[in-house]
Image: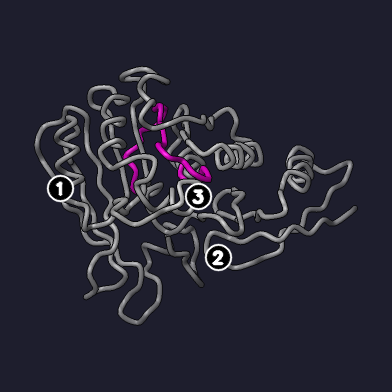
C-alpha cells in the first residue's frame, strides 16, 4: 500500500492534505487511477481545491481568478429542475457547472468559456470528478452562444458574470482576473441577451451580481423577455448593506417578483450563520473566500 499526499485547498480556503492509498485490491480502483492522473495533470502554477461536497475537487490557478462565495451561493440558489439542460455562461474554472451538476441532478450542463487556458483547466476538473457524462466545457464567446448552440436549446441558464462596468480605466484584455471582474469581453446586456436566446419558453435564468447593478439587471431582463421572479439580497451580517444579489427569472413569464428573506453570511456574534453552514455542507466553517 503506497500513500500519495496531495495538498488540497477546501472551498473554505484551508489547506488540508488529501491522502490517497493505492492498492491493487482497492475497492475504489477507478478513483485511485483518477487521482493518480491528477498528479501529472496539475501544472506548476495550479492548485487543487476541495469543494467539500461528495468528494468533488476543482483545479485553479494559484495566481489567477479563483471562485468565491458568490459562485457557491448561485449553485445553491439556481432554479434548475431535475433532468433539465443547463448552460453556465462564462463558466471560468467550472465551479458552478460542477456544483450544479452534482446538486441539482440535471440531464446535462454545458460550461461556456472564452479563455482557452481557463476552459482547458475547467475540462481537467470535469475529468478529475468523472463528470464527463454530465458536464461539457465548450470554448466560445457568449455573444456567439445562440449561433453555437441554437435558439431555445436550454431549459436553464446560470451565470456569474463580470460585476464591474469597463469604465474609462486601462485594463489588460489578457488578464484573467480583469476579464472575470470587468466587462471587457462581454457586458451585462450581452449575457442577458444570450440567455434569452438560449432559453426555451418558460426556461429559468439565475444570476448572482452586485446590488448596485439591480436596475440595469431588471431593465435588461425585461427588455429581453426574461421576467424577474425571485430576488434575494445577501448581507455580510444583520445591519449591514447587501453586497450580493441572487436573481432568477422566467422566459416569457408573467409579472410577479417575490423577494425572499435576506441571506446573512455572519450572525451578530461574528459566526457563520446556520444557512451558510448548510450551503457549505459543514457543521463548522472556518473561513470563506472573497471574490
Q: Are marks 3 and 1 in contact (CB under 8 Å)?
A: no
Mark closer to the chain start, 2 or 1? 2
Relative to 17, residue 184 above or below: above
Q: x, y (%) of residue 181?
A: 39, 53
Q: Nearer the viewer, mark 3 or mark 2?
A: 3
The location of residue 130, given as percent across then percent down, is 64, 36
In three-dimensional space, the C-alpha distance between marks 3 and 1, rounded to whole angstroms, equals 35 Å
Q: How many C-alpha atoms fall within 10 Å of the one at disc 3: few (<14), some, or many (≥20)?
A: some
Q: What's the residue at 22%, 33% (across, down)?
A: 250
Q: Quadrant of residue 116?
A: top right
**Residue at 35%, 30% in the rendered image:** 143
| Precedes in sequence: disc 3 or disc 1 | 3
Q: Position of residue 58 (x, y in %)?
A: 59, 49
* Circle 3 residue: 176
| In front of the other: 146 or 50 | 146
Magenta region: which residues?
A: 77-96
Residue sitting nearer the eye, 243 or 129: 243
Q: What is the quadrant of the C terminus in the image?
A: bottom left
**Circle 1 residues within 10 Å: few <14, some 14–19, many ≥20:** few
Residues at marks 2 and 1, CA–CA distance in whole angstroms = 33 Å
Instruction: Point out the frontmost of discs 2 and 1.
Output: 2
The earlier-in-sequence mark between 3 and 2 is 2
Q: Residues under labels 3 and 2: Cα distance?
A: 20 Å
Q: Residue furthest left?
A: 255
Q: Which residue is mark 2?
A: 13
Location of mark 1 (residue): 258
Instruction: Say left or right for 148 vs 200.
Output: right
Image color mode: one colour
Asked whether disc 3 touches disc 2, contact meaning CB atoms under 8 Å apart, the reply is no
Q: Does 86 appear in magenta?
A: yes
Determine the image quadrant of residue 225.
top left
- Identify the secondary structure beneath mark 2: loop
Amino acid at each position: 500500500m503506497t500513500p500519495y499526499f496531495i495538498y488540497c485547498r477546501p472551498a473554505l480556503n484551508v489547506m488540508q492534505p488529501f491522502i490517497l492509498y493505492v492498492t491493487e485490491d482497492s475497492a475504489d480502483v477507478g478513483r485511485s487511477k483518477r487521482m493518480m492522473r491528477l498528479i501529472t495533470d496539475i501544472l506548476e502554477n495550479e492548485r487543487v481545491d476541495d469543494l467539500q461536497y461528495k468528494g468533488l475537487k476543482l483545479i485553479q490557478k494559484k495566481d489567477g481568478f479563483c471562485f468565491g462565495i458568490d459562485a457557491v451561493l448561485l449553485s445553491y440558489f439556481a432554479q434548475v429542475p431535475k433532468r433539465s439542460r443547463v448552460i453556465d455562461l462564462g463558466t471560468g474554472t467550472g465551479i458552478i457547472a460542477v456544483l450544479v451538476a452534482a446538486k441539482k441532478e440535471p440531464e446535462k450542463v454545458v460550461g461556456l468559456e472564452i479563455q482557452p487556458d481557463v476552459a482547458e483547466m475547467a475540462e481537467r476538473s470535469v475529468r478529475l470528478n468523472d463528470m464527463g457524462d454530465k458536464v461539457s466545457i465548450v470554448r466560445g464567446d457568449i455573444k456567439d452562444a445562440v449561433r453555437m448552440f441554437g435558439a431555445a436549446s436550454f431549459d436553464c441558464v446560470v451565470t456569474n458574470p463580470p460585476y464591474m462596468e469597463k469604465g474609462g480605466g486601462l485594463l489588460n484584455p489578457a488578464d484573467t482576473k480583469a476579464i472575470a471582474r470587468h466587462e471587457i469581453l462581454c457586458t451585462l446586456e450581452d449575457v442577458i441577451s444570450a440567455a434569452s436566446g438560449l432559453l426555451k419558453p418558460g426556461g429559468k435564468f439565475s444570476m448572482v451580481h452586485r446590488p448596485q447593478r439591480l436596475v440595469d439587471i431588471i431593465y435588461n431582463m425585461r427588455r429581453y423577455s426574461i421576467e424577474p421572479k425571485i430576488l434575494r439580497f445577501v448581507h455580510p451580517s444583520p445591519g449591514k448593506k447587501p453586497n450580493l444579489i441572487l436573481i432568477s427569472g422566467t422566459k416569457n413569464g408573467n409579472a410577479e417578483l417575490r423577494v425572499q428573506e435576506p441571506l446573512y453570511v455572519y450572525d451578530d456574534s461574528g459566526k457563520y450563520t446556520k444557512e451558510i453552514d448548510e450551503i457549505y455542507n459543514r457543521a463548522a466553517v472556518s473561513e470563506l473566500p472573497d471574490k
